[in-house]
């Protein structure tokens, strides 16, 4: 009894799964990079638009 060996080039399911797996990794890395870039490069709130500090603590409401 002899069997035929299907090599890696003849296995379309494994190839498709590998492509999907790698594409998912690339998308995840791209999203992580975009989030990190956004967090590191966003401009801080200008002082003129920030609310002034409170002069006195608020009185408790009784």
Image (spheres, rainbow, N blue to C red):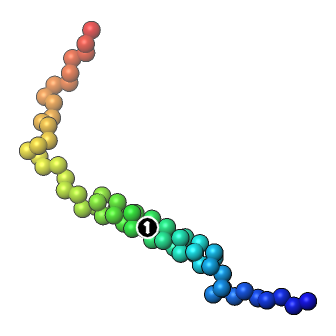
The residue lying at 36 percent from left, 66 percent from top is 33
Instruction: Pick the quarter of the image with the N terminus.
Output: bottom right
The residue lying at 53 percent from left, 70 percent from top is 20
Task: Give above or below for 36 relative to 9.
Answer: above
Quarter-of-image position of residue 37: bottom left
Measured from the top left, where is residue 57 in percent x and y? 20, 24
The residue lying at 76 percent from left, 88 percent from top is 5
- Which residue is identified by label 1? 27
Quarter-of-image position of residue 58: top left
Q: Is residue 55 left or right of residue 28?
A: left
Measured from the top left, where is residue 39 in percent x and y? 30, 58
Task: Give above or below for 12 relative to 21.
Answer: below
Quarter-of-image position of residue 48: top left
Measured from the top left, where is residue 14 in percent x and y? 63, 76
- How packed mark 1 is, by other alpha carbons closer than 10 Å (few <14, some 14-19, many 20 or more), is few
Q: Is residue 19 left or right of residue 38?
A: right
- The residue at the far right in this view is 1
Task: Give above or below for 9 relative to 24.
Answer: below
- Total numbered badges shown on the rendered structure: 1
Q: Secondary structure at mark 1?
A: helix
Measured from the top left, where is residue 6 in percent x and y? 72, 86
Q: Is residue 26 left or right of residue 37?
A: right
The residue lying at 79 percent from left, 89 percent from top is 4
In the foreground, 21 or 36: 21
In the foreground, 25 or 42: 25
Instruction: Pick the quarter of the image with the C terminus.
Output: top left
């Amino acid at each position: 009894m002899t069997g035929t060996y299907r090599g890696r080039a003849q296995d379309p399911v494994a190839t498709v799964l590998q492509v999907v797996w790698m594409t998912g990794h690339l998308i995840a890395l791209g999203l992580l990079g975009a989030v990190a870039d956004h967090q590191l490069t966003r401009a801080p709130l200008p002082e003129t638009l920030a609310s002034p500090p409170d002069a006195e603590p608020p009185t408790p409401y009784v």
